[in-house]
Amino acid sequence: MAEEVVMPKLGATMQTGTIISWLKEEGDPVETGEPILEIMTDKINIEVEANATGVLLKRLYDVDTEVPVMLPIAYIGEPGESFPDRRSDLQDEHRTTLGQEEDRTESENEQTEPISSTNVHTKPRRTPAARKLAMSHGIDLNQINGTGPNHRIHVKDVQAYIRQQTKVSPLAKKVAEQNDLSVMDSSGKRVKKEEVMRQVPRPRDRFIPYHGIRKAVGNRMHQSSHTAPHITLTTEVDMMTSIELRKRLLDRIERQTGYRLSYTEIIIKSVAHTLNAHPMMNASLNGDRIDLHSDVNIGLAVAIPNGLVVPVIKNADKKGLAELTEESKTLAQIAKENRLSPDQISDGTFTISNLGMYSIDTFTPIINQPESAILGVGRIREQVVSVNGTIEARPQMSLSLSFDHRVIDGAPSAQFLTDLKEILENPYELLV
């Protein structure tokens, strides 16, 4: 019997996947574990492997199609073997469900007017909304065939009648045909050329599809900003000593790992160290309880061409600067190539969003739920400050901490940021 290949569910929040490309044609031989297509989820791109050996009998969906998780997307079997077309069955079932919902909604919202013995032969059965629309356009309801039960007239029947009666000028019709536009108007008025021209897209107008990772990022940001009460605290950090530390370790870490130590790794190490002393910052709201995570897993926001992904450095508090440098650089490169695995983006407990490479001082980062806090990092720039009674130009960096006020209060959040500032200004304490 032919084996189904289904759209995988790669996380609790994944509802659909989008087919990016097919790696096998119908009729091509495939082996178990061999990639047959690539999909895009709300977080990553990933290859789907064959779960059987045989030939690819059928590809049920084309490229760029969004498919719900756990639905069949292909069949693998022996040449000529039959298989069920479950896609058609599911589509028919979906359309039936939608139709039932539409009828039920209209029935609930538009109750049929009662018909008395005096009007049963003179007035057709209709909903109040249909009657109102017909009256506003001077339409005799006796001219309309209702599609509801017992020929009841609904709003959609009146609208269909209006569209059939719309008058269109010859020039408007010609313009519409040339530009593949509709000339139907629900008002029943004569459609003129000028009205059709307003629908003609300008040559400079462009659009990009809002789907895949871009849509998923938007939905997650919208959900986070609307469910978690965001409070943001900011502070300035004197980075003089951290800069000196980086200079001292730069050559040694590069010889050891092949990567250059950046301020990002120093910040990751400092954040992970500080989180151990502030467990409420390393927590998640889970229904009617707050989970305090024993592991410190730091997510690092990485910009990619079509959105944002957050690879996770597991147990960051237990790793040195050399290991953090190698892992963060490797994860960032894999992220930009859309090759992150589900394990590499899961189980984060705290996120860092670093915009220090841009001309950005402070910003308000949005929490990466179900985490309870996120740290925004700005650029390092020289500022004139007072140091022990003297005026000096010192390298300053801004930190912006956004936290979920349902989980954490302002005072402990301020203390966390104060302690983090202290560590970054005295990074050699990390060696103690």
Image (spheres, grey):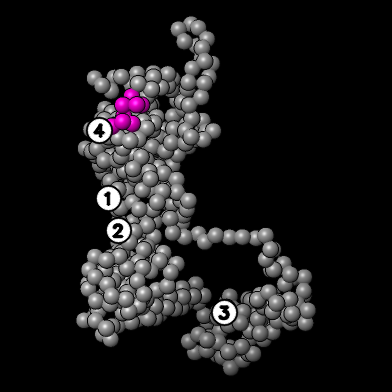
The x, y position of residue 177, in whole percent, is 69, 79
The x, y position of residue 202, in whole percent, is 69, 63
Asked if the residue under mark 3 is in contact with the one under mark 4, i.e. CB atoms within 8 Å, the reply is no
**Which mark is first along the chain, 3 or 4?**
3
- Which quarter of the figure has residue 264? top left
Q: Which residues are magenta?
A: 249-256
Secondary element at tag 2:
loop
**Which mark is first along the chain, 2 or 3?**
2
Q: Residue at x 27, y 72 (%)?
A: 30
Q: The disc labelled 2 sits on which kind of residue? A: Leu
Magenta residue check for 57: no
Q: Which mark is residue 10?
A: 2
Mark 3–mark 2 distance (CA, rounded to whole Å): 41 Å
Q: Which mark is residue 156?
A: 3
Secondary element at tag 3:
helix
Instruction: Report which residue position mark 1 lands on.
Output: 343
Please identify the quadrant where the N terminus is shown: bottom left
Instruction: Mark 2: give few (<14), some (14-19) or many (20+) Cα within 10 Å.
Output: some
Q: Residue at x 74, y 80 (%)?
A: 174
Mark 4–mark 1 distance (CA, rounded to whole Å): 18 Å
Secondary element at tag 1:
helix
Q: The disc labelled 1 sits on which kind of residue? A: Asp
